[in-house]
Image: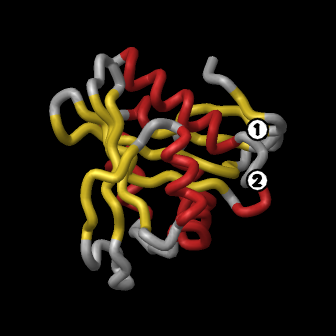
Amino acid sequence: MPASAPGATLRGFQPRDVPVVSHIVAESLHEHYDSSLYFSLSQQWPSGFLIAADPSGTPVGFLLGVTQIEGEARILMFAVERNWRTRGVGTALMNEFLERCRVRGMRRATLEVRVSNVSAIRFYTRFRFGVTDLLRGYYSDGESGYQMARDLR
């Protein structure tokens, strides 16, 4: 069983999570995706899609990882509901994801983050991610992003 954060338990994605995950994405990431995207991405690497759920089973955060390049994991989406931030939920999700990457033999992990999201950049830096590239106009609203990566060996 995956680790947990105080008040939340980590588990795999379930189709019934889509409405709440969609809401967290809209609120935290300022993006809107068709719900079918979550289903199709969950099929790509089921154990890479982690949900942090409150005691009632409702998602309060998630990390969606995919593998598009051999030996490399990519964090496609990662967010924690505002009221659950700074309570260890993000740390638990990241630790569990990185462990799953190691078990699967991944050599590297990457992600993208808005240049304005200073708290997320600081969080990723604590996990040894470093900026590898500036992605101009990367987000749907035109904001640029940083690509960040870390070695998993």
Check the image and tell me how it is coloured: secondary structure
Q: Residue at x 49, y 45 (%)?
A: 125
The kind of residue on which mark 2 rests is Trp
Say which label, 2 or 1, has the lower sequence index: 1
Q: Residue at x 76, y 38 (%)?
A: 8
In which quadrant of the rendered view does residue 70 lie? top left
In which quadrant of the rendered view does residue 77 lie? bottom left
Q: Residue at x 34, y 79 (%)?
A: 140
Find disc 1 in the rendering and name its residue.
Answer: 8
Find disc 2 in the rendering and name its residue.
Answer: 84
* Mark 1: secondary structure: strand
Disc 2 versus disc 1: distance between alpha carbons? 9 Å
Q: Badges 2 and 1: C-beta atoms under 8 Å apart?
A: yes
Relative to residue 68, is residue 131 drawn left or right?
Answer: right
Q: Classify 10 Å Cα crowding around label 1: few (below 14), some (14-19), many (20 and above).
A: many
Q: In the picture, which quadrant includes the C terminus?
A: top left
Q: Is label 2 or label 1 in front?
A: 2
Relative to residue 27, is residue 133 drawn left or right?
Answer: left
* Mark 2: secondary structure: helix
Relative to residue 127, is residue 51 drawn left or right?
Answer: right
**Residue 57 point in image, percent of width and height:** 74, 42
**Residue 9 point in image, percent of width and height:** 72, 33
Towards the viewer: 127 or 26: 127
